[in-house]
Image (cartoon, helix red, strand yellow):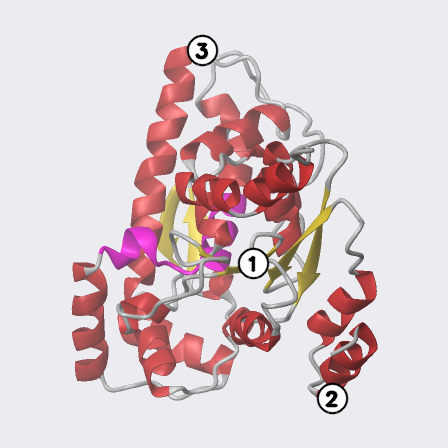
Amino acid sequence: MTMLEVHAAALAQVDEAYHEFLLRYDVMRKSVYGFVEGKEDPSYYRSLVERFIPEDWSIEFLASGNRKKVLDTEAAFDWTRFSRRQIVFFVDRDLVHFLNPEIAYPENVYVTDGYSVENSIVTRDVFARLLEEVHNVVDWTPQERDQLLHHFDQQLEAFQELLSPVMAQIGIWRRDKVRANLNNFDLGSVIRVVDGQITSTDDRQTVDQKIDRLCQCVGAEAASAQQRDAMEEGFRAANGPRNLTRGKYLVWFLTAIANDCHGRIDQIVQAYQNPPRPKLTLGVNNVMVVAAPRARSPNSLRTFIENTLAAFIQARSAPIAG
């Protein structure tokens, strides 16, 4: 099959990411390729991948749209024509492994350790760097810094606990293949930060009230309380609150807690009478771009890149024996 025929086949399948790849691909170019789910994902993966490849090589990302489309694209490739080490795929773990632990993937598919890429970004270290490098909190003592990090840990745990029933309901929808637009969930109408503490909003104190609001936002019906309780029990047994809370909800938390701490910094750090002027406004729409370059690479991702993209580049760059 010629490249034109491959191109035509891609058009016939209406796989836009695959089609875009074929337009970009040049066998002689020093490029490796990564398919991701969303348009924001390259902001996270690029900074991590580029640490492992030479300066004269580039990583090109293509957004497929969602998890299923990324995996469908991988399945559409003729791997007798392309290298699995040059072309890789990044997908979120989501709740897929929680619901189906036996699922397996090809060697060039990376699955996040937590629910999504965002879970590797929402950490105490990134929180501290946001306060220091974005909110301009630089005059803290080591003790005050440790106090803020401990506060972050406590509030993150409280947030994950409050969302556990919500994640259980999402798990039921995932299991039963119910359509629910989770991006529409107005998290701020259910949870807020008051005087530094994560708490429920006044009119969403109970689990049923939170689930009712979730259903209103995403356009899906709630399961019975008995079903939700059973799912939540399994979710907690799998350490779900810590590892499988939806990443985009964690990003909301990171933004809220960082901004709240900055606003109250004069109550925590003695050097300040008023909050210092931030270098930029941190919000849910830009936090990924700001926070991702400050995140550490998970060990699993580092190993994956070394075994695929870096190995391909090394083999391609090796001198040919005479």
Residue 236's spot in the image, x, y percent? 20, 60
Residue beneath disc 1: 84
Distance from label 2 to label 1 (Cα)?
23 Å
Magenta-drawn stretch, dominant element (helix, strand or loop): helix
Pointer 2 with pointer 1, Cβ within 8 A: no
- Asked whether disc 3 touches disc 1, contact meaning CB atoms under 8 Å apart, the reply is no
Residue displayed at 61% across by 33% down:
51
Q: Is residue 206 left or right of residue 297?
A: left
To which quarter of the image does residue 61 belong?
Answer: bottom right
Amino acid type assigned to the residue bearing label 3 in the image: Thr
Residue 137, percent from left and from top: 57, 21
What amino acid is at disc 2? Ala
N-terminal-most mark, 3 or 2: 2
Is residue 206 visible to us here? no
| Residue bearing the label numbered 2 | 12
Q: Does residue 245 belong to the magenta stretch?
A: yes
Mark 1 element type? loop
Quick check: is 133 in the magenta stretch? no
Q: Which residue is mark 3?
A: 141
Q: Give residue 121's position: percent from left, percent from top.
A: 49, 43
Residue mark closest to the camera, 2 vs 1: 1
CB under 8 Å between discs 3 and 2: no
Residue range highlighted in magenta: 239-256
Q: Nearer the viewer, mark 3 or mark 1?
A: 1
Q: Is residue 63 left or right of residue 123?
A: right
Badge 3 or badge 1: first in the primary sequence: 1
Mark 2 packing: few (<14 Cα in 10 Å), some, or many (20+)?
few
**Which of label 3 and label 2 is nearer to you?**
2
Vertical side of 242 occupied by 38: above or below: below
Residue 154 higher or lower than 105, as above or below: above
